[in-house]
Image (cartoon, helix red, strand yellow):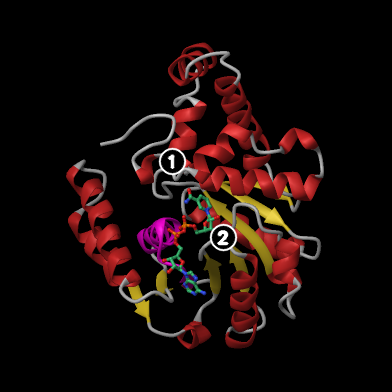
Amino acid sequence: MIKTIGVIGAGTMGNGICQVFAQSGFTVRLFDAAPGAVDRARATIEKSLGKFVEKGKLAAADRDAALGRLHPSTSLDTFADTDYVVEAIYENLDAKRKIFGALDTITRPDVILSSNTSSISITTLGAATKRPGQVLGMHFMNPVPLMTLVELVRGQATTDAAMQTATELCKTLGKTPVEAADYPGFIANRILMPMINEAIFAVMEGVGTPEAIDAVMKLGMNHPMGPLTLADFIGLDVCQAILEVLHDGLGDPKYRPCPLLKRMVAAGQLGRKSGRGFYTYA
Ligand code: NAD
């Protein structure tokens, strides 16, 4: 019986993950290494739940109950009573390996340890534990409370039983799980990032302006957002990092990050978060 969820990392993804578990009735323990991060996450969750209440999609009592199920942790040791863990710290292999090693000693041996990683090998994270069969990828999409997809990534050693448990958990959250194998970029980024990269090559070669390229993909392909608007939203540095993982891991030159993308990242033009990318933001 899964009742208590441990979430590590209280950033963009971690707070959304906590919110959906707490809203679905789970007790949630949230740990972050940075001082104040858990408090900021709680404030973000409160604001997000408040919007659902304003829109009439959530009762005020259910918001209060969800917030009551959220418990800040000051140490990973408090995860000893968790039944399932989702790691959502920043995208760094060494840091994630350390966390998985620590969780392996703190949590019960039957507990599934999952990672929200966008691109790091689940098999490698599993190898940092003595329970690789219980390690899998649980790749939520941003913003977590609104996006229904969860990519469930099966590592080389992940058991069918662990995948089944994660699948059922996703359904309890009202999400749609889709299984992907543990190859660089899984499914979502394997397909999305080359499209974004190609759109950037098209800008570099003068095939079209960013506005023209986004308009073609929105109006002609029915995408809700053009690829360059989406790249600005994700962060151009993040796009470059994921393309490098695809390029290194798959070895095909078709994944090389576009020189214009690299030049913009070097100039600090990272998209929305820096105020400038393919578009400018107030
Ligand atoms: P973020 O930078 O917003 O948050 C990361 C948090 O992890 C920070 O609060 C940081 O203090 C904390 N942290 C770092 N090292 C830690 C440690 N050793 N122990 C505890 N806490 C630690 O990052 P994010 O955008 O939420 O991304 C988290 C993960 O989700 C990454 O693996 C990323 O690839 C993945 N992801 C991100 C998105 C997205 O759109 N942002 C989408 C899907 C998946």
Give the x, y percent position of residue 150: 56, 48
48 displayed left or right of 175? left
Residue 241 sits above or below residue 204 on the image: below
Tell me if residue 12 comes above or below residue 243 in the rendering. Answer: below
Q: Does the segment drawn in magenta span residue 12?
A: yes
Q: CA distance from mark 1 to mark 2?
A: 20 Å
Assess whether residue 173 is covered by the magenta stretch.
Answer: no
The answer to whether mark 2 is within 8 Å of ligand 1 is yes
SS at badge 1? loop
Q: Main secondary structure of the magenta part?
A: helix
Residue identified by numbered label 1: 269
Which residue is at a point 65% across and 38% down the rendered structure image? 257
Q: Quadrant of residue 41?
A: bottom left
Relative to 36, does residue 151 appear above or below in the rendering? above
Q: Determine crowd level at label 2: few under 14, some 14-19, many 20+ residues with C-alpha closer than 10 A.
A: some
Q: Residue at x 30, y 73 (%)?
A: 36
Q: Nearer the viewer, residue 194 or 182?
A: 194
Residue at numbered disc 2: 91
Q: Which residues are magenta?
A: 5-24
Amino acid on which the number 1 mark rests in the picture: Gln
Q: Nearer the viewer, mark 1 or mark 2?
A: 1
Residue 225: where, in percent of width, then height? 45, 26
